[in-house]
Amino acid sequence: MAKKQFKSESKRLLDLMINSIYTHKEIFLRELISNASDAIDKSYYKSLKDSSIDFNKDDFYIRISVDKDERVLKVSDTGIGMTKEELDANLGTIAKSGSLDFKSNNEAKDGIDIIGQFGVGFYSAFMVAEKVIVITKTADSDEAYKWESSGADGYTISSCQKDTVGTDVIMEIKKSTDSENYDEFLDPYNLKSLVKKYSNFIKYPIKMMMTKSRKKEGTEDEYEDYQEDEILNSMVPIWRKNKSELKPEDYENFYKEKHFGYDKPLKYAHVSVEGITSYNAILYIPSRTPFDFYTKEFEKGLELYSNGVLIMEKCPDLLPDYFGFVQGLVDSADLSLNISREILQHNRQLQFIAKKIKEKIKSELLSMLKDEREKYEEFYNNFGRTLKFGLYSEWGANKETLQDLIMFYSSTERKLVTLDEYVSRMKEDQKYIYYATGENVNNIAKLPQTELIADKGYEILYFTDEIDEFAIKVLMNFKEKEFKNVSSADLDLKSEGENDNKENEENKDLFSFMQEALNGKVKEVRASKRLKTHPVCLATEGELSIEMEKVLKAMPDNMAGNVHAEKILEINTEHPMFEKIKNAYADDKDKLKKLSSVLYNQALLIEGLQIEDPVQYANDVYELIEK
């Protein structure tokens, strides 16, 4: 029989189909199963229009058959089949989609979702097969037809015998090479795994004869192999079931089955949206942080399905980075897919779904914060940092989404509190939201700089994460209340009878001498109005605080350069140490130089900063003790 040539740009186009469009060869099975599902859907649709056709869903299925010895893999369906003309038109023209024509010529009805759109999925079979044979028969014909091709050199169509209605796609699998393992596509257990991965929720049974083992009758430890027909797919996905049918255990079991995590999720949400863009989603908030969550290796994203067919294992565009901890999936029939169904074109449908998913996640978190406080704090201890990184990133663009979700430890409540809770307790005369920074809660509580604020009864938020202060700087204010670091040079606090300039004016020369003795390490030495029991502390001017300086200097390869906060050494003029300072200034200025250095280094230690010369510091302390 005469060989026909493909009606498209033949070899070059087919080579593109096989070698460039699909990233993974295993995708071919997904494509062929999706085509088989479409063929059965078409039979169902035809039965709705023609009452003389009996559609019994139990009679419709997809079967996978393997012959390892002959290296043959077959995917069969009991669907509508193709006429000779359809076979020539659909498989003779690359990128001609019978499913797309079917969708165009028929109105959507009774939940019919045709998966195929582009007509290239069938040709993915050539990624793994040397030869592909299609045998098909329609219900209206007694004759069957065979399409056969070894690739770009063309195809033949001939009459053949087939007893049942439907289509068989028969592939002669390539031999394995040093670089490619094609034997895996003849392994029933690997094929079963691929069906579970990509086509688990195709709504028709996918059957395959599986070899199993059982104990021999009449024996205790002897086993024999036997073959049994097995349905490989689950068919009805949990997200398409009515919520009223499902129990919490169903969602938790699905979480484990999908390997979203080995923990029990803190919270889940089942979303069903109908409209211009319809979709279903199941979202999970894990109870534990994945071991690689705060590393570059962590891959965020939700599983993405189209009509129950897996399109992407991780679709990052569905989640903003700050909600990257969320696990789950989205299924929509309305997405505009690219030609390979592997990656999405950036489109309005995807953006719409992502926006709604983001809103739903925030809603669920706020609900947990309000009604399940302990559970929310458990979540926050695991994932709070990523919310604060989200606040810092994009220069506060995510402020409205995240500011109500972040929490900090409170000096007065002795627990995590929200910014809203802090502001609701602010005293009438309080202008700022005060915070202090440090490595941990205990260290911050001992900071000298907190004494005056605490003495006035003001609540202080403790910042213990390196991102905290950076995030707050971007946030700038909350409910029109600015943030103020307790180490800020200007606390903007006025007390009755307090003369801000008196002590500094009286000790102007003394403080200037100490500043010079410190050789540019501080911008100024001055009397402190914040200290009560401690002799000295460091304050800062400008936007860069001491804690921010520490974080930036800890960056790899000194990426931050020679950054430093503008430090001010504050002296408690009510402390006994100040008398020693004044006496040294009057009688022994060399001693005052050492004393200035020691006090400065002590202030650094309190802040958790390194001393430039520990040996010199120790020697200075010894000399002062001896005197």
Image (tube, grey):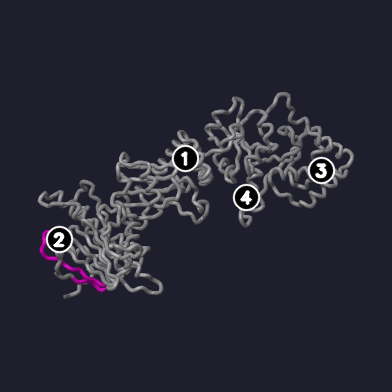
Residue 552 badge = 4
Q: Earlier in the sequence, mark 1 or mark 4?
A: 1
Residue named by callout 3 = 595
Residue 28 visible to the viewer: no
The secondary structure type at the circle numbered 4 is helix
Three-letter amino acid code at disc 2?
Answer: Thr
What residue lies at 36% left-to-right and 52% top-to-bottom?
Answer: 304
Q: Which residue is mark 1?
A: 401
Residue 626: give x, y in percent of width and height: 87, 45
> Is label 3 in a helix, a strand or a loop?
helix
Q: Are marks 1 and 4 in contact (CB under 8 Å)?
A: no
For discs 4 and 2, the disc positioned in front in the rendered view: 2
The residue under the point 31% across, 65% down is 224
Kindly identify which numbered label has been placed on residue 583.
Answer: none
Q: Is residue 590 above or below residue 122?
A: above
**Mark 4 touches mark 3? (CB < 8 Å):** no
| Residue found farthest to the right | 587
**In 3D space, how far apart are the residues under numbered discs 4 and 2 (Cα atoms)?**
71 Å
What is the C-alpha distance between the residues marked 1 and 2?
Answer: 56 Å
Viewport quadrant of the N terminus: bottom left
Q: Residues within 10 Å of mark 2 (few under 14, many from 20)?
A: many
- Report how far apart the C-alphas of labels 1 and 3 lie in the structure: 50 Å
Q: Examine the structure image and report whether residue 155 is included in the region drawn in magenta.
A: yes
* Residue 138, numbered circle: 2
Observer-side mark, 3 or 2, equals 2
Residues shaded magenta = 138-156
Q: Say whether disc 4 or disc 3 marks the residue closer to the N-terminus.
A: 4
Mark toward the start of the polypeptide (1 vs 3): 1
Tell me the amino acid under the disc marked 4.
Leu
Closer to the chain start, of discs 3 and 2, is: 2
